[in-house]
Amino acid sequence: MSKLQLDTAINFRLAAKRCLEERDLGNHQYEMLAFPAIVNLSFSFELYLKYILNKRSLGYNRRSHDLLYLYNSLDDESKKLIEQSFIIKSHFRTIQPYDKALSLFQNWFQEKLRKCSNGFIEWRYPYEFIERNGEIESDYGFLLKVTDMLEDYGLRLERGEL
């Protein structure tokens, strides 16, 4: 089951990337499928986290879609590896493990995660969420980057490298 869970996460991430492709409609108009992209990225994120939790034999609520809850259910070693990977592959790459900037980064990361934590639920029915809350927001760039890190981490786990 674990490998299938990882493959499913990879497929939903790929579907999201395809949704984010701009289609030229002519007359300087472009089409991009933002709602399905956010839903697919959020679901992919969830599946990657659940895959890691299962591989690490960590307990969690299997019915939860809450990304912050799932991320915080990871062991410290997994979180550290994911955060280090994010730092290395992003504009934060100059942060060193001993820098006080690291704690600022971790706070920023947790806040970004909190804001997109329920994306799978909120973006499936955006009109309902907007009617109740007045607006909806997400950072698909953040979701893309983190799911990239999680895919790398998941594949390394599957190969037995971690």
Image (cartoon, rainbow, N blue to C red):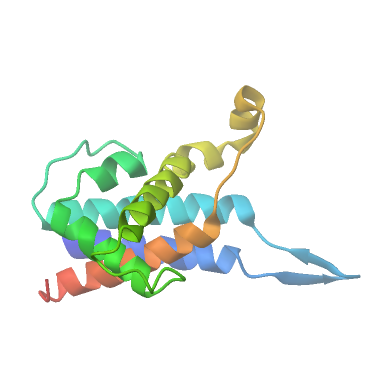
Answer above or below: position of 155 versus 40. Answer: below
What residue is drawn where x is 67% and y is 28%?
A: 134
Q: Position of residue 78 (x, y in %)?
A: 18, 59
* Camera-nearest residue between 155 and 89: 89
Quadrant of the image containing the N terminus: bottom left
Position of residue 69 in the picture relative to residue 132 (left or right) = left
Q: Position of residue 124 (x, y in %)?
A: 53, 41
Position of residue 97 in the picture relative to residue 30 (left or right) = left
Answer above or below: position of 62 versus 105. Answer: above
Q: Position of residue 16 (x, y in %)?
A: 51, 62
Position of residue 98 in the picture relative to residue 105 (left or right) = left
* Camera-nearest residue between 161 and 6: 161
What residue is drawn where x is 47% and y is 42%?
A: 115
Residue sticking out furthest to the right? 27
What residue is drawn where x is 20% and y is 65%?
A: 3
Q: Position of residue 34 (x, y in %)?
A: 62, 55
Quadrant in which residue 55 is drawn: bottom left
Residue sticking out furthest to the top? 132
Quadrant of the image containing the C terminus: bottom left
Quadrant in which residue 77 is drawn: bottom left
Is residue 27 visible from the viewing direction of this image? yes
Is residue 7 visible from the viewing direction of this image? no
What residue is drawn where x is 53% and y is 52%?
A: 38
* Camera-nearest residue between 111 and 157: 111
